[in-house]
Image (tube, rainbow, N blue to C red):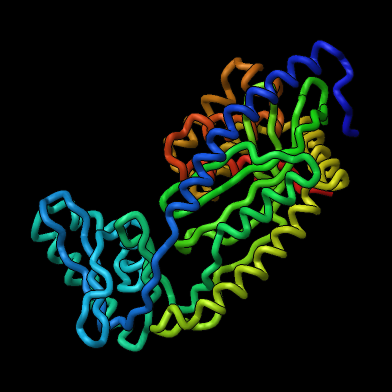
Amino acid sequence: MTLIATTQDQIEKSRARLDRYIKEGSARAVSALERIEREVPTDHVAPAALMRVVEGDGPNSPLWLNVQTRDERTAVSNPLHRHALGNLASQASMPMAYVDHLLGQGDWGRVLVARNLTDGVRFGNAQSKYLVRTAGGNVRAVLSNKFRRIDARPILEMLVTEASRIGAKCVDGTVSDIRVEMKFIVPRILEPAPGEFMVFGFAWSNSDYGAGANSLRSFAFRLACFNGATLEQNLRQIHLGRALSEDVEWSRQTLEADTRTATFAARDTARALLSDERIARTADVISRAHAEGIDPKATLAGLKKKGITKATEAKIAEAFNSPDVVELPPGNTMWRFSNAISLVARNTQDAEQKLELERLAGDVLPKAA
């Protein structure tokens, strides 16, 4: 049963924390919005035969990708972001552990990696074409030319408009080189379990570089400690469409049509996630997690199946087993376990890892009824 906080002192303290969160989070959201507006990818579609990986200047400089047009003009000549390097390594059937090993061997290793990537892509996929996406002065992704491009800016504009329509606020933003997540909340404080004062909304995420789908998920935020978790997925659009020709400009109409479809799908999903019914369902998830006792050792062991590193697992275990009952709710419960993951996420500087941990914090909770 979802309760409205009734003790005046509790309401005032929670409201002060919420106001602080909105103020601090809004600054991060504005910064994220500005970066999204600024870093719009530039696209080139290139046959495998016209792509070449070369060594950069200096022993620690990144590898570069050169792409030529059919009339031998240079279309792309930029350093490879690690994500794009991983894309190429996958296409050339080279494990990244091996690529990293060679790159650590000095000049000869870098030469070998560049040559193997070039040959692996050219000869192993001779008939293939790739979408090369550049931004911020580097190649951030080398994707299939069937990657469906979606312009994130109209989607985000629609979400801000839809949230404002019902009084919800954009309160946080996390942007890495290859992925973005923005959080929206309804600033109405609920108490889904005794002493657990919270607000609810949704988190929107997207990757222009093949590192995730265009998706919306329920979002829950604990006011006592500013821990957050993104819960079950409600919209997930895979970036897969029709093959792009080498004349990317020719396909601008397709880009606009795909973006329009994604924008209205996001709008409709946002409306559902901000509804009183959905917020009540999400609050019920918290209530059940608060009441669900767990075996901490067995639950921690289950994280290994989710790709968590030993170092991160140790941090989660340390947080869960600590005597802290302010940053974390008390008891050996699934709700405390979720918050232990959220706490580690909050103290993580790496944007990609932070996003993954916030999702994990939601994934371990019970499913909505």
Image coordinates for residue 220, horizontal then vertical, percent: 71, 38
* Image-based side of 335 in relation to 118, left or right: right
Q: Residue at x 83, y 39 (%)?
A: 284
Image coordinates for residue 174, horizontal then vertical, percent: 52, 42
Taking 105 as reference, is 349 above or below it?
Answer: above
Taking 369 as reference, is 149 above or below it?
Answer: below
Image coordinates for residue 175, horizontal then vertical, percent: 48, 46
Q: Is residue 335 visible?
A: yes
* Image-based side of 344 in relation to 13, left or right: left
Most foreground residue, 282 or 310: 282
Taking 103 as reference, is 112 above or below it?
Answer: below
Image coordinates for residue 199, horizontal then vertical, percent: 75, 33
Q: Residue furthest top?
A: 9
Taking 92 as reference, is 64 above or below it?
Answer: above
Most foreground residue, 125 or 102: 125
Task: Specify the quadrant that holds the N terminus.
Answer: top right
Most foreground residue, 85 or 244: 244
Q: Residue at x 67, y 29 (%)?
A: 336
Q: Residue at x 23, y 71 (%)?
A: 66
* Image-based side of 60 in relation to 172, left or right: left
Q: Is residue 291 visible?
A: no
* Image-based side of 274 in relation to 49, left or right: right
- Which quadrant holds residue 299? top right
